[in-house]
Image (tube, helix red, strand yellow):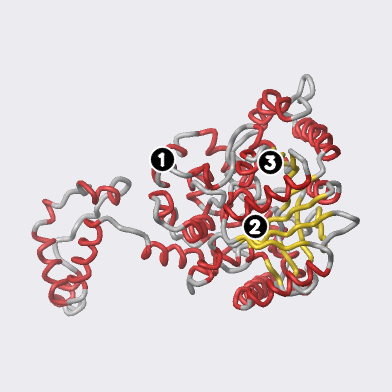
Amino acid sequence: MSGGDTFLGMPAFPVNAAAAVQDSQLRFNLRKATHTIRAKRATVVGELPDWLELRQAGKEIKDHTLRNLERYLLQLEEAVTAAGGHVHWAADAEEANRIVADLVKATGETSVVKVKSMATQEIGLNEALQAEGVTAYETDLAELIVQLGDDWPSHILVPAIHRNRSEIREIFQDKMADWGRAAPEGLTDEPRALAEAARLHLRERFLSTKVAISGANFMIAETGTLVVLESEGNGRMCLTLPETLISVVGIEKLLPSWRDLEVFLQLLPRSSTGERMNPYTSTWTGATEGQDFHLVLLDNGRTQVLADKVGRQALRCIRCSACLNVCPVYERAGGHSYGSVYPGPIGAILTPQLRGMSSELDASLPYASTLCGACYDVCPVAIDIPEVLVHLRAKAPHPRAERLGMRAAGWVFNSPGRLAGAQRLGGRFRRFVPKHLPGPLSAWTNTREIPDIPAESFRDWWNRTDGGAR
């Protein structure tokens, strides 16, 4: 139950979050998981004396690549083609889904296995394939839980972070048989037992499915190589066993050279799973061992983001999820509140740029933050998320009453005389100022009170006492 269409028509973030914070089990699950990952990350990052230099290098590599994206994409296409692969260009979700569906149907198969891919969730590929009579089976453990539970992912790294062990056991017992091999009798909620049930279920699928769909963490322009980092080994099975491999990758995932990849193989594991080295790093170049390989390069709004001088830094993102794990808003509201496959602080700046801010939900996302800056501090590629949030807030649609109010405030603040007069007026009538504003202005004071207005302004006090000298 993933993909962009899933979230159409969802209410704005404040409405979603208000419901989520009432779920005590959800808050417990999120707090436990995010604090555990956060602590592990802090430990392994603290081991590197040159972490800030690595972070700066990652930022500069991504910025250089984005400035020269057209050149490196053409170099990538040439290298993949020379290695026996086929490159397809998709301007939007509809075109990408059509390309993949046509490629799968050309094989005559009616099922595919998938390596965890946020790009395919972004475009709603599973639903598009289902409409064409093709069933997509998720093979990442967390994605499997989400799929079996007819659920939505709520975290970039751990999509089922909102589920505890007991809930996962129930999902396996109730739904696993509908998708293939049933869960073992007497299944407990012990992690080892749950993992074994998933392994047995997925092994049959790997051995019987001839088409696979993947994403990629990185693409290397100089050789046409794709790179996937994962922790379970399911990706390795998915990438090697099927006869046809189709990779759907956002155009921003590009790196110029293998030397650049070295930087990110240090940044990503530490920032995402809190590990010094990724357990499984798979690379492939073109058609290998007789496998038919297709690369679908996805735009879907990315060139539009690239045109924004402030917002384009969101395209540096390497999907590590470090910003989610430190965000006080995400920890309490959960990923579903964001109405996107990209939750948390990075989703609050990436989704409105990819989808636009015409819907109430997307227009509300830049406000899903306290602007505390914790997300920027932990970002391994130094995305200044608070800066982009403020930038997008200025571009978001605002109610007429709010626009008029801000215009009036600007008129007052632009004149020292008018400001002084307003302060004196406020002091005289301070007893009549309500703690909560009425009507369209109530959104600001629903969760906070207007502070008490002093009888005398600082300006008047300063003039009366010569700055406190008398």
Query: Secondary structure under badge 3?
Result: helix
User: In the image, what residue type sits under mark 2?
Assistant: Cys
Measuring from the top left, give residue 45's x and y in whole percent.
69, 62
Left or right, 38 with respect to 213, comes to: left
Looking at the image, which residue is at 80% across and 71% down? Answer: 223
Measure the alpha-carbon separation of dots 1 and 2.
27 Å
Query: Secondary structure under badge 2?
Result: loop
Task: Please count the marks in the image.
Answer: 3
User: In the image, what residue type sits under mark 3?
Assistant: Ala
Measuring from the top left, give residue 358's x and y in whole percent.
39, 55
Query: Secondary structure under badge 1?
Result: helix
Do the numbered discs 2 and 3 sit on residues whose CB atoms are within 8 Å? no
Q: Quadrant of residue 188?
A: top right
Measure the alpha-carbon separation of dots 3 and 1.
26 Å
Q: Earlier in the sequence, mark 1 or mark 2?
A: 1
Location of residue 21 with respect to 352 vertically, above or below: above
Kindly identify which numbered label has been placed on residue 18. Answer: 1
In front of the other: 232 or 99:
99
Q: Earlier in the sequence, mark 3 or mark 1?
A: 1
Do the numbered discs 1 and 2 sit on residues whose CB atoms are within 8 Å? no
In the rendered image, which quarter contains the N terminus? top right
Measuring from the top left, give residue 246's x and y in whole percent.
74, 53
Looking at the image, which residue is at 83% across and 34% down? Answer: 204
User: In the image, what residue type sits under mark 1?
Assistant: Ala
In the rendered image, which quarter contains the C terminus? bottom left
Residue that label 3 marks = 142
Residue that label 2 marks = 320
Looking at the image, which residue is at 68% across and 70% down? Answer: 51
